[in-house]
Image (spheres, rainbow, N blue to C red):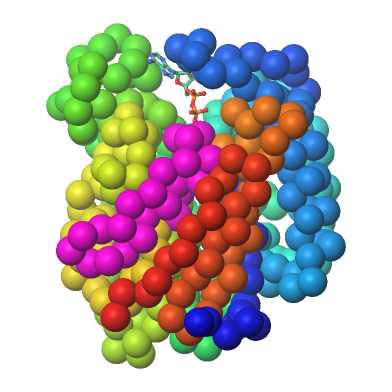
Amino acid sequence: CPPLTPLFTFGVIADIQYADLEDGFNYSRTRRRFYRSSLQLLKNAQRSWAESAVRPDFILQLGDIIDGFNKGPGASERALDTVLREFSGPAEVHHVWGNHEFYNFSRSALLRSRLDSSALHRDRGLSGDIYAYSFSPAPGFTFVVLDAYDVSLLGREPSSEQYGHAMDLIKLYNNNDDLNCPPVLEGLQRRFTMFNGGFSQEQLDWLHALLTVADDKRERVTIASHVPVHPCSTDPVCLAWNYDELLAIIRAHSSVVCYMAGHSHDGGYCQDKDTGVHHVTIDGVIETPPDSDAFSTVSVYADRMVLKGEGRVEDRVFLFPS
Ligand SMILES: Nc1ncnc2c1ncn2[C@@H]1O[C@H](COP(=O)(O)OP(=O)(O)O)[C@@H](O)[C@H]1O
């Protein structure tokens, strides 16, 4: 049995996508989106964390904090103020960036905004505008926030070299006029859409170096990013463009225990059979009915993490691979 008192705990919440709008639907009109109610579900999460006997040491906000629909009416800043007010508790919040961050703000604006939570933890090994960093909430444990839109058409100036590179890449696989439309009906190639992105070689090299140090110190590393990287943890239409390169790095390092993502709005989970690493995709608040919930609290012990899901988030236990 694990000891009763965890070493530390943290809260997780994904895809809030708040907007002051009536309910709507996803693109294929199969799922309802609760734009206003998402704020109430965030309040529910904060109340629960504030009232719990063991308060979370930090919160992981897995991206898409406000919806792209805020941009048109010029409501991005107002919507961001509204949601961030709900995050103003004592626990440090680690913000991950998703596609909807880039629908609302430019990359340079994000790097100057309250959604840049890297300030205290910034690693100088990375160049200026890649939003990736690590932090250690307790001895022996490291968390890494990764930028899944480092290689992307989103957030990059159309005149930039990075945009050109991302365009060349997506065009290899997607011939549609609308690059948000997946190129095929089935299979892994569906991931080459404009609402996904990937990790640059510079970011992969940085991660590799960080994990090499973590392996030597026998640390336990959890990676958080908006976009899932394991095909068994999500619908392939939500995978990172170069998910395979990220998986190869994880497989080359013994320190990684868990990869957490949002983006798909449906929960998903698998344990990689080669490494034992747990890949979890957290259910999105935006597609969660007002009478339910979508957040979780993770308790970390020496040999495992125990995820207690609320509402439609399933409970899970992540035993650390030995
Ligand atoms: N199958 C599709 N064909 C064309 N455009 C799509 C398709 N799916 C999504 N989109 C568009 O891509 C963008 C992102 O989709 P959205 O569902 O809002 O992403 P998220 O799941 O991150 O909320 C939106 O502008 C949406 O209209």
Q: Residue furthest front?
A: 1
> In what quadrant of the picture does the C terminus appear?
bottom left
In the rendered view, does 227 fall on the left or right side of 193?
right
Residue at 58%, 85% (x, y): give it: 3
Figure quadrant of residue 278: bottom left
In the rendered view, does 260 fall on the left or right side of 185?
right
Residue at 50%, 70% (x, y): give it: 305
Q: Picture coordinates of residue 219 (x, y %)?
A: 39, 83
Say if residue 137 shows up in the picture.
yes
Q: Picture coordinates of residue 277 (x, y %)?
A: 31, 64
Figure quadrant of residue 198: top left
Q: Is residue 291 magenta?
A: no
Depicted 119 relative to depicted 83: above or below: below
What range of the chain is rendered magenta? Answer: 260-283
Q: Picture coordinates of residue 93 (x, y %)?
A: 67, 60
Q: Picture coordinates of residue 42 (x, y %)?
A: 74, 43
The quadrant where ligand 1 appears is top left
Residue at 52%, 82% (x, y): give it: 2
Residue at 53%, 40% (x, y): give it: 283
Say if residue 161 shows up in the picture.
no
Depicted 91 relative to depicted 304: above or below: above
Of 238 and 120, which appears nearest the observer? Answer: 238
Q: Is residue 281 magenta?
A: yes
